[in-house]
Amino acid sequence: MADRSADAWYPTAAYLYVLHLDGLALAWEYLRRHPDYRRDWLRRRFRPDAAHAWGLRLLEDPTLDARDAHPDWFPDPVGMLQLYPDADPPPHADAFAFWRIPGCKHLIHDGKRLVLTARWPGCCVRLALAPGLANGMAYLYAVRACATARASYRTTVAELDMLATVGTAVPAAAARSRPTPAALLDLHTLQALDAALAGASLRETAEGLFGTEAVAAGWYADGGLRSRVRRLVRRGQSLMRGGYRRLAHLD
């Protein structure tokens, strides 16, 4: 059996950032591992229309993980706040103030409007800025009409509450509780998926995830740890091959 300890997927510490990702960021982590997506990225000059097939407006570099990537999803995720100029503002209406938005900001133009992502410890807010909206203008929030408008409204309110709570004082760090079982599941799933894509066996994958001692004690035919690792690999492959759309609420 080959020594996999030097492989990029082997150290679990390299995946700790996954514990703090939201659904959209996790969706990107699974999508960027798809071999066909990576191939489309390399051929993007010859396939400019390939992004929509993956649920994106623009292809994003798959070598960037969710901490550095800014995928522009299509259609807009449920949590995207849409801002438009107010054509009939009341007196003393709140004005759009770009520099009062907290966190580290990233702007991209998707061909129709600016998309702003603001991140600070523990939070991430995404804003779609309509053409014509300028700094200092009165503005409106928009919610897309749909059969689940009430749920969309609640999501919008939650995003606005994040902005209002922080105000101008952006925390340098955030205290977090213990990782949830769901967060740990995604960490192990991504690590197991990377191991499978690198050609590792199930036993080698288990040693990277849970340690050689645990594998020596609990590795037996079709039971316990072996079945667990098999399920993790299958889950990762399923999410990579289209299941990521559910995480990003694209369906």
Image (cartoon, rainbow, N blue to C red):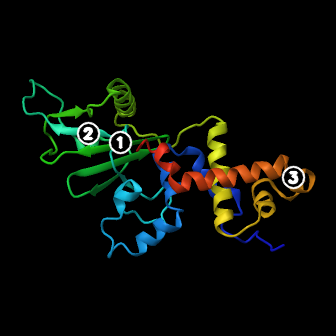
The amino acid marked with disc number 3 is Ala
Indicate whether 20 appears above or below 156: below
**Crowd tier of the residue under label 3, counting other residues whose Cα lies within 10 Å: few below 14, some 14–19, many 20 or above:** few
Q: Is residue 163 visible?
A: yes
Q: Quadrant of the N terminus?
A: bottom right
Coordinates of residue 197 in the picture (x, y in percent)? 64, 66
Which residue is located at x 7 percent, y 33 percent?
A: 87
What residue is disc 3 on? 214
Q: How far apart are marks 1 and 2 (CA)?
A: 17 Å
Q: Which of 57 and 13 is in front in this view?
A: 57
Q: Under tag 3, what secondary structure?
A: helix
Q: Residue 80 carries which label?
A: none
- Which label's residue is closer to the chain start, 1 or 2? 2
Indicate whether 190 appears above or below 21: below
Q: Under tag 2, what secondary structure?
A: strand
What residue is disc 1 on? 102
Quick check: 154 left or right of 37? left
Q: Nearer the viewer, residue 81 or 232?
A: 232
Indicate whether 234 appears above or below 161: below
In contact (CB < 8 Å): disc 3 and disc 1? no
What residue is disc 2 on? 82
The amino acid marked with disc number 2 is Gln
Quadrant housing residue 89: top left
Which residue is located at x 62 percent, y 53 percent?
A: 236
In contact (CB < 8 Å): disc 1 and disc 2? no
Q: Under tag 1, what secondary structure?
A: loop
Count numbered badges in the picture: 3
Q: In the displayed image of the protein, which residue is found farthest to the left? A: 88
Of circles 1 and 2, the one toward us is: 2
Coordinates of residue 3 in the picture (x, y in percent)? 80, 73
The amino acid marked with disc number 1 is Pro
Q: Quadrant of the C terminus?
A: top left
